[in-house]
Amino acid sequence: MSLIGKMKANNAFTFIEIMLAVIIIGIIVALASPNFSKGYSRFELNKSTDDLLSVSRWAQAMAIGQERIYALSFSADRRFYNLVRAKASGQDEGTANTEDADGQISFEPVRGSLGRMHMIPSAIHLVMRQSYGFNRTGDTDLIQFYPDGTIDPATIQLNSLEQKTVLSSTEVRGMMTKVNDE
């Protein structure tokens, strides 16, 4: 056998070398996966917070610009929210808001991507409180944005496994802001 033939035969990996490489890669993956799940949980919380703040700020700008009440509407189980606006009183989309027989404002969904149902990931728990201290329950969970720039006083707490974020409309007057990030 020539020298070139011997070199080709010695360049192959043995079964033991391949198994050692697989074991080392497995150990690295096992050590990295808990950090990945923590990072993904943190990413979900930050994304949900940013989405909620964006929709809130857009609602406030539209309420002022269209002189119409807008509101964030939360589902009873706090898994979904969407943006709604007060129905106009006339056919011509006037600025006056309509109220039903009980004096409650009637709302309609906002058209477009911001009016769709936004989902809160299952790993995140949402708690909404009014600033006067009680939990709001039921299907009328609204945070309203008024044409004069004011917002219903509310605090929204988003909790994941290891982190929580608090949004509030009471800390900075007239604005929904992130006030606590732990």
Image (spheres, grey):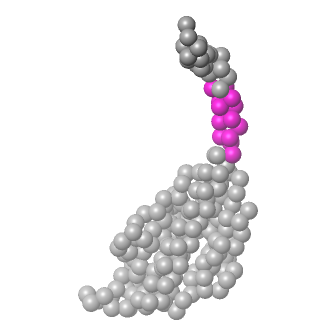
Residue 9 visible somewhere in the drawing: no
Q: Residue furthest right?
A: 182
Q: Is 109 located above or below residue 158 in the figure?
A: below
Give me the residue at 37% from left, 91% from top.
95
Dividing the picture into quadrants, the one containing residue 137 is: bottom right
Q: Residue furthest left?
A: 91
What residue span does the magenta drawing correspond to? 22-35
The foreground one among 35 and 133 is 35
Instruction: Check if residue 28 falls in the magenta segment.
Output: yes
For this view, does 98 lie left or right of residue 128?
A: left
Q: Is 182 located above or below residue 15 in the figure?
A: below
Dividing the picture into quadrants, the one containing residue 21 is: top right
For this view, does 20 lie left or right of residue 69?
A: right
Instruction: Check if residue 8 falls in the magenta segment.
Output: no
Give me the residue at 49% from left, 79% from top.
58
Give how far across and how far down residue 110 sits, in percent: 38, 74
Give how far across and how far down residue 136 sits, in percent: 58, 68
Q: Is 133 located above or below residue 96 in the figure?
A: above
Q: Quadrant of the N terminus?
A: top right
Q: Quadrant of the C terminus?
A: bottom right
The foreground one among 160 and 136 is 160
Give how far across and how far down residue 30 sits, in percent: 67, 34
For this view, does 180 lie left or right of residue 9?
A: right
Q: Is 79 located above or below residue 51 in the figure?
A: above
